[in-house]
Image (cartoon, rainbow, N blue to C red):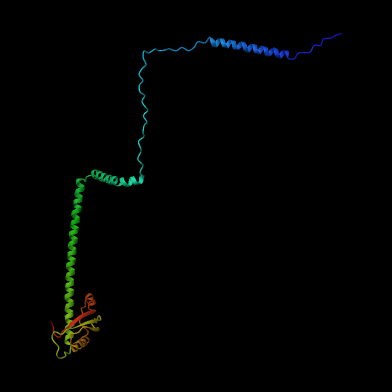
Amino acid sequence: MSATLHYPEPYRFSAGMLAMAVHVAFIAMLVLGVRWQSHQPDRFSVELWDSLPEQQPTAEPVQEIEPQQPPKQPVEQKSATTSLPQKAEIELRDKKVRKESKPQPSAKELQRKKLLEEQRLLEAYAEKQRMAVRESVRAEVLAATSAEMGRYQDMIRSKIRHNIFMPPDVLPSAAAEFKVTLLPDGSVLDAVLLKSSGNAAYDEATERAIYKAQPLPIPTDPVLKKRFRELRLTIRPEDK
């Protein structure tokens, strides 16, 4: 007995599915191709010319040239060259503005300034007069002082001359000059010969007479008495 063996065919189902997919794809491509062929092309218009138009020369693009900027000077140098004129101009303008804007003084203010100026002139004149009076008084005091000193010096010379033991052959023009230092009571502290008379005997006799005549007459006024602390006396044989 023969038995026919049936083996299963496992690939038959897969092959059927693949064939079906290929057919579906082919049909889809046909449909898409028909639709693409039925799409109308874009429309466009054409214009006919008798002759070609003249070609206008195309202008070349103008290249803008940027102006070359001058090299910038340092700020310090520019200010150094321009600050002085500008400063002078500003100062002049400010002075002019201040002068124009300065308020004019009122009549009352002008009167007040006039009175102050007159008062100042009067005070200056009065001070000048006072100075003149002081100078006059000073001159009178000096003159009186000089006259008083001269009077006392004449008295001193006369007293010394009366105490000279006159040597022989002394000329009337002989003159011996001494520096005499006195004490406040008129006593002679020292007598120094400054200039000789040319006669030594007369010089020695005059020096002895100075010490012999003390106390010498001096003023009682304290101011004048200070001027008689040291005297320069010229003694002659006779008054001249």
Q: Is residue 221 above or below residue 54?
A: below
Instruction: Describe residue 74's horizontal placement relative to residue 169 as left or right.
Output: right
Pick the residue in front: 109 or 15: 15
Query: Residue 64 at x, y = what percent?
Result: 36, 31
Vertical side of 62 occupied by 209: above or below: below
Q: Give residue 107's position: percent from left, percent from top.
A: 19, 46
In the displayed orientation, state which residue is furthest to the right: 1
Q: Could you tell me which residue is drawn at 23 percent across and 79 percent down?
A: 230
Find residue 222 and report its image quarter.
bottom left
Q: Is residue 117 visible?
A: yes
Query: Farthest residue toward the front?
Result: 51
Q: Which residue: 69% across, 13% down?
A: 17
Decide if residue 28 is on the left or right side of residue 40: right
Q: Is residue 59 left or right of residue 100?
A: right
Q: Kindly identify the residue that appears in the image at 19 percent across and 49 percent down.
A: 111
Q: Is residue 185 visible in this depiction of the protein?
A: no
Residue at 18% from the left image edge and 72% from the top image edge: 142
Q: Residue furthest top?
A: 1
The residue closer to the viewer here, 158 or 95, is 95
Q: Residue furthest bottom?
A: 168
Q: Position of residue 171 (x, y in %)?
A: 13, 87
Viewer-closest of 223 and 170: 170
